[in-house]
Amino acid sequence: MQRVSRRSVLGAAPALLLGRSGAVILGGGSHTYELAPAWGRLPEGIRYGYTHGVVMDSQQRVIVHNQSRDSVILFDRDGKFIKSWGPEFEKGAHGLTLRRENGTDFLYLADYVRHIVEKRSVDGEKVWSLGYPREAGVYASEEQYKPTNVAVAPNGDFYVADGYGLSYIHQYDSKARYIRTWGGKGKDPGQLDCPHGIWVDTRGREPVLTVADRSNQRLQTFTLDGRHQGFVTEELRRPCHFDQYRDELYIPDLWGRVTVFDKGNRLITHLGDNPGVWQTKGYPNLPQEQRVPGKFISPHAACVDSDGNVYVVEWISDGRVSKLRRVS
């Protein structure tokens, strides 16, 4: 069993700085970012609910999944509103995964209230809707199944993380046909406790399934057929999900920061670190006067564009979306 340690840190977690122009600067060294002020303004009549998911499509449009009547919102990279759709996801909008298949972008959306995963076009056209995995034999009823995120392998197989349900991982083929189930609640190798996020990591020689085992405060890795490989246990508080940029892994951490790992899952830096924020009265729904620009409250998902800019959405009732513009 492999256990990764990062006691030798590649980059310190720097304090929040102000640039000469008053810009808010996060990170440091080769991972320095400037907070883009007021990015992603919404038009009149549209309001965020809890912002849960964010991805970047092949046209470099930013797509946000949130719990509102406009549950899927598209922006350009500069934050200009393009369109919205998805009122049916208002209550259960959660995980959002994008995969390009035969030249077309598709979204995999997890809805934990309706107990479904759906595949849709970026414009909202439904490809299929998948209910709870009766074949797994681990659920007494549909209500026990509450999917939070989806990962897709290079061959088209996809994996559903039942983060808010019974902590299982379910594997399907590219036609949404059931293959296998593993996991279940616990702390032992192969067991999980709120597998909130899930990702097929392609940075190594072979793809690896990486799970944000949130309540166990660790990452857990598996082969693509579900065999436990190892843990990553340091520099993590409550890991939520992932995005991959070149040889780096970006991990939104519900407890006030975004963590960046190198190819060996060693720490590069923490972004927007806000120690102890989760102990603040009213967390995560803090009033505006307690929301410090550049200090995260509850990062729930993040994605990175082709220039290395980072987009972060937070678990806050009226939504919070930030763009970190890569400086160096």
Image (cartoon, rainbow, N blue to C red):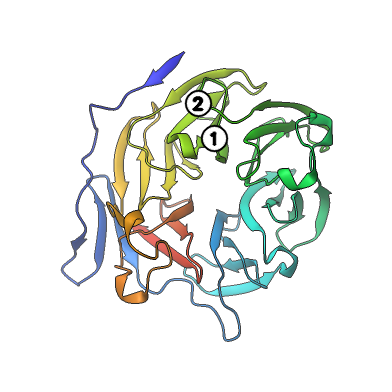
Q: Residues within 10 Å of mark 2 (few under 14, many from 20)?
A: few
Q: Are marks 1 and 2 in contact (CB under 8 Å)?
A: yes
Q: Secondary structure at mark 1?
A: loop
Residue type (three-letter) at the residue carrying disc 1: Asp
Q: Whole-percent x and y of residue 62?
A: 55, 61
At 45% from the left and 67% from the top, the residue drawn is 320
> Which residue is depicted at the point 33% across and 30% down?
266
Which circle marks residue 193 in the picture?
1
Q: Position of residue 283 (x, y in %)?
A: 40, 62
Q: Which mark is residue 317?
A: none
Residues 201 and 58: in front is 201
Q: Is residue 308 left or right of residue 318?
A: left
Count neighbours of disc 1 (C-alpha within 10 A) and say few if under 14, some if 14 to 19, many if 20 or more: many
Can residue 305 be seen here? The reply is: no
* Residue type (three-letter) at the residue carrying disc 2: Lys
Residue 196 seen anywhere in this rendered image of the structure: yes
Seen in the picture, residue 306 relative to 235 is either above or below; the reply is below
Q: Residue furthest bottom?
A: 44
Q: Residue at 81% across / 57% down in the picture?
A: 126
Report, in whole angstroms, how far the alpha carbon at label 1 lies from the one at label 2: 7 Å
User: Is 88 situated above or below 268?
Assistant: below
Q: Secondary structure at mark 2?
A: loop
Disc on the earlier residue, 1 or 2: 2
Total labels drawn: 2
Quadrant assignment, res 285: bottom left
Disc ID at residue 187: 2
The image shows residue 56 at horizontal and vertical percentages of 56, 55
Left or right? Give the position of 240 relative to 114: left
From the top left corner, tell me how far across and down residue 183 is, in percent: 63, 27
Along the viewing direction, whichever of 233 and 27 lies nearer the viewer = 233
**Residue at the farthest left position:** 20
